[in-house]
Amino acid sequence: MSNDSGRDKADKKQPGSLDEFSERLDRMRGHGQNEPSPQKSASAWGRAMRISSDLLAGVFVGCLLGLGLDRWLDTEPVFLLIGLALGFAAGLRNMTRTLKQENDQSSER
């Protein structure tokens, strides 16, 4: 008995070229649809770092000024807490200003 019928089944199940397989796989995965480019992703990361550094810088400067005033006037936690609150407020203000500027720039494009 020959096994010709087995070969016919194998020929029918034979996949296409590797390029065709890759294209089908990409379609199934949804590649090429709404995929952010690496440049946009890096740009978003840079914006996030800038915004977070705006907030942290305000808090850091407020704490340093509060500590300096506390040591100079010998009033330990008072100016530290005031500086922390003012630094946080200034950081939020800087953060919102940065977000507004970026929003205005993106709407111009």
Image (spheres, rainbow, N blue to C red):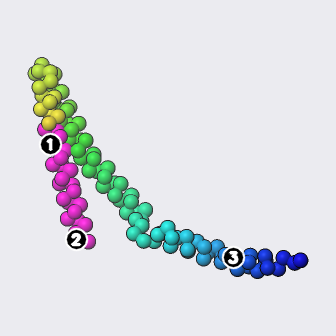
Q: Earlier in the sequence, mark 3 or mark 1?
A: 3
Q: Is residue 104 magenta?
A: yes
Q: Which residue bears the numbered disc 1?
A: 89
CA distance separating discs 3 and 1: 67 Å
Q: Is residue 78 left or right of residue 43?
A: left
Q: Is residue 85 left or right of residue 107?
A: left
Residue 69 against residue 89 in the figure, above or below? above
Secondary structure mostly taken by the magenta-highlighted segment of the chain: helix
Mark in front: 3 vs 1? 3
User: Which residue appears at 70% of the width and 76% of the height?
Assistant: 14
**Type of amino acid at the residue the image marks with label 2:** Glu
Q: Is residue 91 magenta?
A: yes
**Is residue 72 in view from this perspective?**
no
Percent across and percent down for residue 24 are 55, 74
CA distance separating discs 1 and 2: 29 Å
Q: Which residue bears the numbered disc 2?
A: 108
Residue projecting furthest to the top: 74
Q: Which residue bears the numbered disc 3?
A: 13
Which image quadrant for residue 88?
top left
Tell me where the magenta segment starts and ends, as one range. Answer: 86-109
Which class describes the residues within 10 Å of circle 3: few (<14), some (14-19), or many (20+)? Answer: few
Quadrant that contains the C terminus: bottom left
Residue 16 against residue 92 in the figure, above or below? below
Percent across and percent down for residue 85 are 14, 36
User: Which residue appears at 82% of the width and 80% of the height?
Assistant: 4
Mark in front: 2 vs 3? 3
**Is residue 107 in view from this perspective?**
yes
Which image quadrant for residue 32?
bottom left
